[in-house]
Image (tube, rainbow, N blue to C red):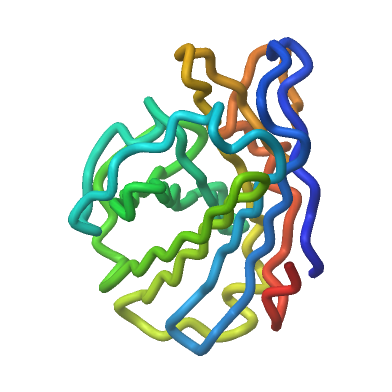
């Protein structure tokens, strides 16, 4: 599937982002790639300082990009990618139930590119066990972002916003399918 435009939640205030697009693709049997591209006044976005590129909790409290991979049975994986290059991975048994650190991930590599009017984050996620293309194809995906401006206001971006309040875990927001190429 090609890149998808994310939109801010309808209740969000206006912010420095003009547009945000995201895409996901299979790189190999055990690696998925995700890319998020932001256009706007990048200097007005609060970007976390560069970190050690390691697993950290609560990344969503600041500017963060996310991917949710839902299995047909309702279980899902939440991946968080911070501009700091830190990351997180959580598993859920069902909608917001049974949250735990995921042990399915063997490595995450995050790279960023920035200019005055654009910002892009690319995350490579290697799974411990190879998955078949049909396993990935069966997943429904949610691609989302939390954008914090320098005044501390947050906007919540997603392909779909099925609820009156921002809720990236809502199953109806998992509408993306991974493609074979990262078209973004």
Hey, which quadrant is residue 164 in on the image? top right
Horizontal arrangement in the rendering, residue 8 relative to residue 27 (left or right): right
In the depicted structure, whether residue 81 falls above or below residue 3: above
Q: Camera-side residue: 172 or 167?
A: 167
Coordinates of residue 141 in the picture (x, y in percent):
64, 54
Q: Nearer the viewer, residue 79 or 7?
A: 7
Q: Quadrant of the N terminus?
A: bottom right
- In the image, residue 36 above or below residue 39: below
Question: Which residue sits at x=39%, y=46%?
Answer: 82
- The answer to whether any part of residue 67 appears in the image is yes
User: 37 and 124: which one is in front?
Assistant: 37
Where residue 123 appears, x then y in whole percent? 46, 65
**134 left or right of 55?**
right
Q: Does residue 70 show up?
A: no
Give the residue displayed 65% in from the left and 38% down from the top. Answer: 171
Height in image: 86 above or below 47?
below
Q: Residue at x 62, y 63 (%)?
A: 139
Taking the image as shown, residue 151 lies to the left or right of residue 54, namely right
- Residue 111 or 134: which is nearer the viewer? 111
- Asked if residue 120 is positioned above or below residue 59 in the image, the reply reads below
Residue at the far front: name it. 116
Q: Total marks drawn?
A: 0
Rendering quarter of residue 159: top right
- The quarter of the rendered structure image containing the C terminus is bottom right
Q: Looking at the picture, how far across and down is residue 109, in whole percent? A: 35, 69
> In screen coordinates, is 20 left or right of 61?
right
């Amino acid at each position: 599937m090609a890149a998808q435009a994310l939109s801010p939640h309808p209740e969000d205030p206006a912010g420095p982002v003009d547009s945000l697009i995201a895409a996901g693709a299979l790189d190999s049997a055990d690696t998925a790639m995700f890319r998020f591209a932001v256009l706007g006044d990048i200097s007005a976005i609060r970007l976390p300082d560069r970190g050690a590129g390691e697993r950290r909790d609560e990344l969503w409290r600041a500017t963060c990009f996310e991917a949710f991979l839902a299995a047909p049975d309702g279980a899902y994986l939440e991946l968080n990618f911070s501009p700091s290059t830190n990351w997180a991975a959580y598993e859920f048994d069902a909608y917001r139930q049974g949250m735990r650190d995921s042990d399915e991930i063997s490595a995450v590599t995050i790279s960023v590119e920035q200019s005055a009017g654009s910002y892009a984050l690319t995350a490579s996620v290697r799974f411990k066990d190879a998955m078949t293309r049909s396993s990935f194809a069966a997943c429904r995906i949610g691609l989302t972002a939390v954008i914090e401006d320098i005044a501390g206001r947050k906007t919540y971006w997603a392909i779909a916003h099925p609820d009156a309040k921002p809720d990236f875990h809502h199953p109806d927001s998992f509408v993306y399918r991974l493609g074979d190429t990262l078209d973004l």
